[in-house]
Amino acid sequence: MLEGDGMRILLAPDSFKESLSAQEVAEALARGFEKSQLDCQLVSLPLGDGGEGTVAALVASLGMCYQHLEVSGPFGQPCQLAYAVKDDLALVEMAELVGLAKIPLDQRDPLSVSTFGLGQLLAHLAATGFKRVMIGVGGSASNDGGLGMAAGLGYEFFDEANQKLEPLGCNLGKVARFSDSQVPEQVKKLELTIITDVTNPLCGPQGATYVFAAQKGLAEADFAQVDRAMESFYQLVNPTVFELAGAGAGGGMGAGLVTFAGGQLVSGIDAILDLLDFDQKVKEANLVLVGEGRMDRQSLAGKAPIGVARRTPAGIPVIAVCGSLREDLPDFPVENIVAAFPIISKVDSLENTLASAYQNLERTACNIGNLLALSQGK
């Protein structure tokens, strides 16, 4: 399907973390193709898969608008939390409140970062009539198992002496009793979808603490104790969650939203593609371009580029354009991705490489366009 004039190209990239939003990646790719000799029609469909930037990627595509609510911030300070709405649907991103980028390096401690404001927002949405809420739980700096969020909804937690506990991760192992008497009825009626790009369980070697807590500032020597505290808490409140894939997402927020807000965990990229009517849009394409900041073997487990490739019909090739490619990738084609191109043009510092991402993307897209133009006889 690569022959003929007016090749229809669907640009469906994820963000390049710490560098460019998904919208900016799509824009750079479009500029590159427009500078090339390829006769093409471009459709931009920036994506997210539940991690940081997911809401921003969807707002323009879905015609949503931003609203803000003042909530309790990651350290208890007043904080304006942004979310997007359209009709009875609200999109929320956990990283907007407690994302790693929001927490200064010298304050990173996943057991003291509060997710209380997230519960406040969900309670507000329920009270103001929103029926459907989708929440992305990637990129968080917390590891509280959703304890803070639950308290924001109205749940109360007590220790063995019946003293009310501050809802922070450091208190997970102290919880002996909890009450839902202060939780509004509307909260229990929310249709809550939890979108995540990971399938990690809540506890154990592949769980929230052992896999993700180090990058959030937790010392390795504390992993075992913190994991036991998380396990102790969920043995009390919802033992069934230990078998749930994705419960460990967002420092255990996946488990928290399932347990305390009746949420349903789904594959982030599939939920987003459904929202964007991807299956219909891709039928009109001759070529699909995907991308992310770094593609590695973990990407093949179902992150955005692979999720898009799996949903692209046979006969429509997919090309990946990425910041870098790890050596642990198998040879392409893989999962309908026929080729993958790193955009880095020279050996440089990480800071300069990230700063040059837009220009590198534009140049790479132009080169790919020129190559594809050969099939048009140009």
Image (cartoon, rainbow, N blue to C red):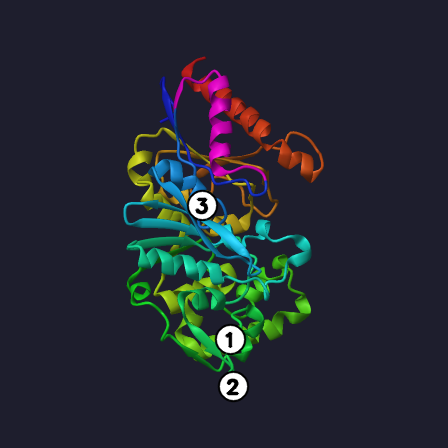
Question: Pointer 1: residues within 10 angstroms few (<14), some, or many (20+)?
Answer: many
Q: Does dot 1 land on a helix, a strand or a loop?
A: helix
> Residue tagged by mark 2?
160
Q: In this view, does 260 lie to the left or right of 251?
A: left
Magenta-tinted stretch: 19-41
Identity of the residue drawn at 39% across and 74% down: 240
- Which residue appears at 61% of the width and 58% of the height? 216
Q: Residues within 10 Å of mark 3 (few under 14, many from 20)?
A: many
Q: What residue type is labelled 1?
A: Glu
Residue 195: give x, y in percent of width and height.
41, 54
Q: In this rendering, would 375 be left or right of 132?
A: right
| Mark count | 3
Q: Is residue 181 above or below residue 57?
A: below
| Disc 2: CA contacts within 10 A as few (<14), some (14-19) or many (>=20) | few
Instruction: Report which residue position mark 3 lands on.
Output: 54
Where is the C terminus found, in terms of image quarters?
A: top left
Query: Residue at left 41%, top 57%?
Result: 121
Residue 340 place in picture, x, y as percent = 52, 36
- Residue lying at the far bottom in this picture: please name it: 161
Answer whether residue 255 is visible to the viewer in this image.
no
Measured in 3D between alpha carbons, the distance from the residue under mark 3 to the one under mark 1, in whole angstroms, is 30 Å
| As drawn, 140 above or below 156 | above
- What residue is pinned by disc 1? 231
Res 114 quadrant in image: bottom right
| x, y percent for residue 247 | 45, 64
Query: Does residue 149 appear anywhere in the picture?
Result: yes
